[in-house]
Amino acid sequence: MDKRLYNYLKITDLKDMLKKTRKLYGEKKAYKIKIEKDKYITYTHNEVRDMVDYLGTALIDLGLKDKRIAIIGENRYEWEIAYLSVVCGTGIVVPLDKSLPENELEDLIERSEVEAIFCSKKYIETLEKIKYSEKNKLKNIISMDLVEHKEGRYSQKELIEKGKELIDAGDTNFTNAKINPETMSIMLFTSGTTAKSKVVALSHSNICSNLMDIGSVLNVNSEDILLSILPIHHVFECTVGFLFSLYTGAQTVFCDGLRHVVENLKEYNVTVMACVPAIYERIFMIIRKQLEKQGRLQEILNNEEKYRNSTMEERKKAFKEIHDMLGGRIKLFISGAAALDKEIEEKYRLLGINLVQGYGLTETSPVVAIGTEKYHKVGSIGKTVPNVEAKIVDENKDGVGELVVKGPNIMLEYYGNKRATNEVLKDGWFYTGDLARIDEDGYIFICGRKKSVIVLKNGKNIFPEEMENLVNKIEGVKESFIFGKQRTEDKDDIRINVEIVYDKELVKDVYKVNTDDEIYDVILKKIKDINRIMPNYKAIRGLILTEEPLIRTTTNKLKRQANLDRINN
């Protein structure tokens, strides 16, 4: 069965993508940038591709041909121009996490052997210090903000002007550069401490196969406006947001910050957004308050069946005020990077908002599977995209096992780490480390991380993510961490415990309690309520309350071992 739903543009590499899409969408707007309140500038797809050519030419003129060049900074069009100018003819691009502390940033610059780095102004001082270490190869710092070169720092803007002069004088070193789509062009560090982070080697072919697959199943085109919100160094935003927007000839706008998501959706008339569950939950709380204000919340709750049996278009008309609050043009919300609460997904769709889940990893460029308008089941990450195969290995009696995938989007290797590569790549299949099941229709349901499963004495498996999802619904709970604890009298017997991070003021206000003991009792009562709806072996037997946030990676993934070590110490 062909899973492709739409015509798509065939491309061999990102340079080929820019060339072909220039012909198709050159005069259309590629970026709309806010300068100040109610004042914007725009760049067309032609202008973007010109800037890439100019900057790439200037980089080669600086002696950076075939070198590794890093980029660090917030989401902005200069970041995207820099990325393309490196990867489309200059060298190997190394996107770095803007949240990294100075010591980890220095380690990654050393490990990746970069010789130049693009950065926004907040990193200049740190990078100047790092540059003078003998341990790394960093020679050139290129500012996204400087108007002209200053004190040994290059200006990206001035390099673009210089590149234009070189091209006008006949320099074709960048524009005629040949791309090998099968070799490493992108180096991505996995999340985690620098000692443990691995370097994912991706090629043009990896990324482009994913762009074509996504383009063939999602209804996104040159009339769309995409809101860039997730950290752009992360492959989810980089492929599904930035590169996919250019591939489809769409327009990209940039979010002013998490608190401004709803107003940005309306301000820019956004049609498509790829984001994480936490943001969709926040937006839904704003929608809920709006429905309460309109006096329509109870009407929805009492008539869910009526709306459930209507089409998405009918729901959209019924909840026009909600859609208008989000700009009135939303046609697709994509949730990825973590599990989306099934209830939240259902509520969005009940309101006529097409929210789907996608799934992928850095190692898969990233998209493995995604829900679409045609192929969708609540709670599922959808079906695999056209060129990707998936199967379950070592499945238990419930059909749950490790998800393994195969396709042209799978990374080349963990660079410089053959042992780690061999652990996850076997006979062409990539072992994701995620536990899942695939139903009879081919829909994939993620159950949790293989490494985080708690195995009880009776052989039953507990998926912490599933239980944390329930605990996090308790009003006043910010986040939670489910873990297994051995009983003192029987080391083989593991009891389920939870650490809860709570909002003290909210808990006091909602439950009308004051003392720490009263807070503990009221949260414990809520945990007991959860226990009643679960099998006995899943019951939570221990509770820790704290106001200290859980330890997470810079991409907001829970560090389970680090949190467990903190509890045990």
Image (tube, rainbow, N blue to C red):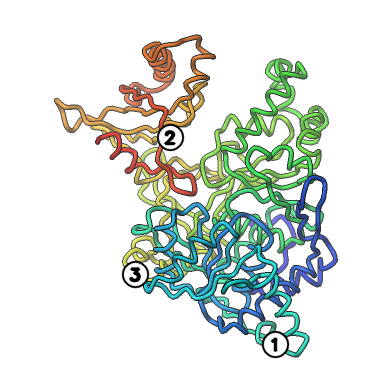
Q: Could you say where residue 122 lies in the image, as x and y percent from the top left?
A: 56, 56
In this view, the mark in front (3 or 2): 2
The answer to whether any part of residue 185 appears in the image is no
Residue at mark 1 to residue at mark 2: CA–CA distance: 53 Å
Q: Secondary structure at mark 2?
A: loop
Circle 1 residue: 172
Disc 3 crowd, CA 10 A, few/some/many (<14, 14-19, 20+): few
Disc 2 crowd, CA 10 A, few/some/many (<14, 14-19, 20+): few
Q: Secondary structure at mark 1?
A: loop
The answer to whether any part of residue 531 appears in the image is yes
Residue at mark 3 to residue at mark 2: CA–CA distance: 36 Å
Q: Earlier in the sequence, mark 1 or mark 2?
A: 1
Which corner quadrant of the image does residue 108 belong to? Answer: bottom left
Circle 3 residue: 418
Note whether 435 is above or below 90 in the view shown.
Answer: above
Q: Quadrant of the N terminus?
A: bottom right
- Given residues 59 and 162, the one toward you in this image is 162
Circle 2 residue: 549
CB of mark 1 within 8 Å of CB of mark 3?
A: no
**How many dots with numbers?**
3
Disc 1 crowd, CA 10 A, few/some/many (<14, 14-19, 20+): few
Q: Is residue 365 left or right of residue 324?
A: left
Q: Is residue 405 left or right of residue 492?
A: right
Q: Is residue 53 left or right of residue 238?
A: right
Q: At 69% across and 82% down in the image, what residue appears?
A: 175
Under mark 2, the amino acid is Pro
- Outermost residue on the front side: it is 151
Q: Secondary structure at mark 3?
A: helix
Under mark 1, the amino acid is Thr
Q: At 72% across and 85% down in the image, what residue appears?
A: 166
Q: At 56% across and 84% down in the image, what residue appears?
A: 63
Q: Earlier in the sequence, mark 1 or mark 3?
A: 1
